[in-house]
Amino acid sequence: MTFWRSITSRRQMFRGAGQGLLAGGLLPAWMGTASAAPTTGGNLYERIGVKPLVNCKGTYTILSGSLTLPEVKQAMDEASRHYVHMDELMEGVSRRLAELTRAEWGIVTAGCAAALTHSTSACLAGADPEKMQRLPNLRGMKTEVVMPKESRNVYDQAIRMLGVTMLTPETADDFRRMIQRPQVAMLSLLGETAQKHPVPLEEMVRLAHAHNVPVLVDAAAERLTIPNFYLTKGVDLVAYSGGKCIRGPQSAGLLLGRRDLVHAAWLNSAPHHAFGRSLKIDKEVTMGMLAAVEAWVRRDHDAEWKQWESWLETIRAAVTKVPGVETKTLLPPGPSNYSPRLQISFDPQRLGATGFEISDALMNGTPRVMVPPGENSLTVMPYMMQPGDDKVAAKAIAGVLSNPPRRPAAPRGEDAPVAGQWDVEVTFTRGSGHHRLFLEQKGKQLAGTHVADTLSGEVRGTIENGRVQLRSGHRYEGTRIGYRFDGVVTGGALRGKIDLGEYGSADFVAKRSFA
């Protein structure tokens, strides 16, 4: 018996045995039982203790992006029913993306960040297998990426992870000098800052090309323009998030541009054994993303805008019934998250709550509504809302504004001066750090410097009834690490929690070493 006949015979044997076991109600332990399925009510998220929300904030990965269109879901389901060769699949998808977007070529990536990484790999190693295998060892390759100060952002880590050195020009002269450096492999720009750079986009592209430097634009949360705004300006590569306004799969991205560079980006990504192997894209997401682009071309964008305006009007009509509440419609400040917004303003003293407290109450309520706050306002973004969400949000927001949450009693500590140097032991969920606080005190106001393990920044805050609240921010490359200390003075020590934003929280104990 040959190997394949043996496999076939075994499969038939197990298939027949399985059918017999199912018919008899018997299953081996490793296959589980039908009773293992959840039987409680609610949707699949609620069955595991996760409470869905109404998204009045926009397209954010932390809020799971957008909701895929029906045609995207259908394409992903159909794609899951067949095997294909991934190189052949992406070749076919690339041709269709080129037809739809009028770009030379296009590929689907594992999110916009992956598109940035693969683009950087393509500019560093091209399609040379030896260089591709060596990444992020840049020996024998160019090692620098120019990115103007206005474009530096938290997402440029997707570029930095290749081991390149980021050059950050602040002036036009800086840019013209840096772009000529022989080690520059790429010019990278954040699309929404294109009008803020000291050198116009067209001139930056011209100067880059004069030195054989490709240009990449990160347009993650922007609308897909056809013909593409950036490519018509001479940009070589433009990257989009697939799971934002295009409403493809949340894990998808889109890379469009010069055929040689886009093709090299694909070779530097999975399923190929290169630096981008871990940034895998599957056939279901690939076809779902293509379906989303197909739908984008057909969508009535003017009608969508009018629908957003009508949703905001529903919310405006409800919240302005609350005494002291005012509203204003805001137009998009830039190309990202491009939709009208409704600003809901109030006096926190009169209302009895800040915008942050109102927002927290909405997130902890039923239904759960996410609305970004300011100190004295909320701002509703309808971009990712669904039909019916306007009525739900209107009722919830008006309800909380009418009956704001009661503030819990503030923790109290020892009312003592806290000026001086404090040695701070920080305990993270894993690991620890030694920080220092240098504080000056003027009444209830605190100011000074927060020194972490390797970074430092200005710190400001207050002390009242022994409770100390401090905020600091530390810059690193294109990002900022924020710290919010909240503790009380007891027994001569300062103890409490640090809110680390997206990185969770940590405990801290601080002891004063110098007064």
Image (spheres, helix red, strand yellow):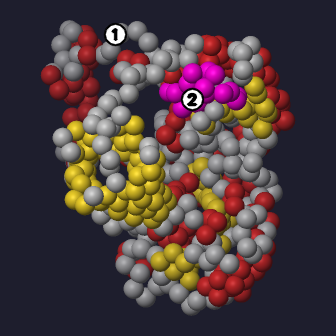
Looking at the image, can residue 249 be seen?
no
* Front-most of residues 466 and 88: 466
Where, quadrant-wise, is the C terminus in this rendering?
bottom left
Distance CA(mark 1)–CA(mark 2): 41 Å
Q: Provide residue 250's location: percent of width, then percent of height.
A: 54, 41
485 left or right of 217 in image: left
Q: Examine the rendered structure and indicate whether residue 508 appears above or below residue 105.
A: above
Residue 235 lies in quadrant? bottom right
Magenta highlight range: 344-360
Residue drawn at the location 68% of the way across and 70% of the way down: 236
Residue that numbered label 1 is attached to: 39
Q: Position of residue 510 (x, y in %)?
A: 24, 50
Residue farthest to the left? Answer: 29
Q: Position of residue 416 (x, y in %)?
A: 30, 43
Between 421 and 371, the one nearer to me in the picture: 421
Q: Position of residue 173 (x, y in %)?
A: 69, 85
Residue 354: image tag: 2
Above/below status of 317 relative to 110 = above
- Nearer to the camera, 424 or 504: 424
Is residue 205 highlighted in magenta? no
For badge 1, the amino acid type reads Thr
Q: Residues within 10 Å of mark 1 (few under 14, many from 20)?
A: few
Q: Residue at x 35, y 60 (%)?
A: 438
Would residue 325 be seen by someone viewing this image from the given angle? yes
Q: Secondary structure at mark 2?
A: loop
Closest to the camera, between mark 1 and mark 2, is 2
Residue at position x 50%, y 84% in the image: 142
Magenta span contains residue 350: yes
Q: Residues within 10 Å of mark 2 (few under 14, many from 20)?
A: many
Which of the marked residues, 1 or 2, is nearer the chain's N terminus? Answer: 1
